[in-house]
Amino acid sequence: MVELVAPLPRFTRARVVLVGDAAHAMTPDLGQGGNQALEDAVTLAALIGHHHDVDAALDMYDTTRRQRTTAVARSSRQVGRIAQAHSPMAVALRNSLIRLLPAGASTRAAARPQTWRPPGPEIDL
């Protein structure tokens, strides 16, 4: 597995834009890699479509997407530390803790990355 542990300082340079794994490769533990690439594309299209100043739209894309993808990548990495435990003691501890969690806890945690909405109230997807 390859991930960008430290987020890139920018996803844009002039009119070159990075999306998906090129911008924010993350572990697959939340299953969000492809989804984040789609969010990038929708955000980029929405911002460029609604702003006359392309450079300003790209700056908004950069700020908006770096904030979101950094949080999702961090969450994925944290889940991976637990989910990918290898030692027998760590696996036993993880499995015991999971059994102690309330039934809805994992459902709520899994739903968090899925609450994203595209920028702008007038955008009709």
Image (cartoon, rainbow, N blue to C red):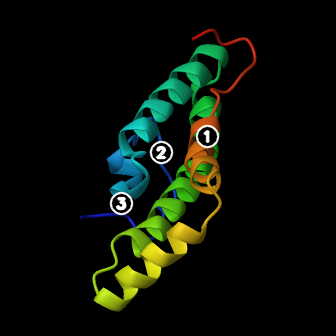
Q: Residue at label 3?
A: 27
**Among numbered discs 1 and 2, the one appearing first in the sequence:** 2
Tag 1–tag 2 contact (CB < 8 Å): yes
Q: Amino acid at mark 2?
A: Thr
In this rendering, the answer to whether 121 lies above or below 77 is above
Q: Gap in Å between the C-alphas at discs 3 and 2? A: 22 Å
Q: Residue furthest right?
A: 121
Q: What residue is rendered at 39% in x and 58% in y?
A: 29
Q: Amino acid at mark 3?
A: Thr
In this rendering, the answer to whether 8 lies above or below 38 is below
Q: What residue is rendered at 43% in x and 36% in y?
A: 35
**Among numbered discs 1 and 3, the one appearing first in the sequence:** 3
- 110 relative position to 108: left or right: left
Residue 86: which quarter of the image?
bottom left
The one nearer the camera, 35 or 20, is 35
Residue 110 screen position, x and y as percent: 55, 48
- 95 relative position to 117: left or right: left
**Element type at mark 1:** helix
Q: Nearer the viewer, mark 3 or mark 2?
A: 3
Q: Residue at label 1?
A: 59
**Element type at mark 2:** strand
Q: What residue is rendered at 58% in x and 14% in y?
A: 49
Q: Residue at label 2?
A: 12
Residue 107 screen position, x and y as percent: 58, 47
Q: Amino acid at mark 1?
A: Asp
The one nearer the camera, 39 or 32, is 32
